[in-house]
Amino acid sequence: MLQEVLAHINNYFVPKSAKEVTYTIAGGVISPSFGAEEGDRFLICNSRRNDGVYTFHANGIKNDDDNKAAGLQDERFAGTIRVCSVPPALLALSGEISSWVAANSAKLAGPFESESFNGYSYKLKSGGTNGGVFTWMDQFRTRLDPYRRLFL
């Protein structure tokens, strides 16, 4: 969920400039080293197979979306890998959003309520703020806005 949240707010909390380097991913190991420490989140860009946000651990890289082994695919690419400095409050909010999505999965699958009788039917939007569509983006908009970036 963290990757979706960061993409939605258009902010990965990375340095603006980065030098493109040729990286090799083999057996889940990235070389050359890119300066990550235990628990750091990092963003891989310009890779054909592994773009995204991951967490660095000495015993293996994890994918934040499911907290399981990332399953990095072996490849060689010219791109950037930048360490993300995501604020702890946003990490907590991302966890809250993930819990909210899990609790509201039935409503998210079908955000419209409909009724029909005697050949007449109508649909109403349900659940969202101000009668809007029921999505995590709408539900958490005001809390995500302080982190939003207009340009990368």
Image: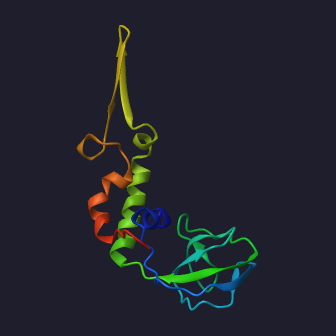
For this rendering, which residue is in front, 108 or 43?
43
Q: Quadrant of residue 12?
A: bottom left
Q: Quadrant of the C terminus?
A: bottom left
Residue at far left of view: 130
Residue at far top of view: 118
- Side (left or right) of 103 relative to 80: left
Q: Residue at x 31, y 58 (%)?
A: 141
Q: Residue at x 47, y 62 (%)?
A: 4
What colouring does the structure picture have? rainbow
- Side (left or right) of 141 relative to 20: left
Residue 89 at what x, y percent from top left? 33, 74
Q: Quadrant of residue 99?
A: bottom left
Residue 98 at what x, y percent from top left? 43, 59
State whether residue 55 is above or below residue 107: below
**Label total for image:** 0
For this rendering, which residue is in front, 4 or 9?
9
Residue 53 at what x, y percent from top left? 54, 72
Q: Quadrant of residue 68?
A: bottom right
- Side (left or right) of 40 relative to 33: left
- Side (left or right) of 43 relative to 85: right
State whether residue 129 is above or below residue 78: above
Residue 7 at what x, y percent from top left? 46, 65
State whether residue 65 is above or below residue 55: above
Q: Residue at x 41, y 78 (%)?
A: 86
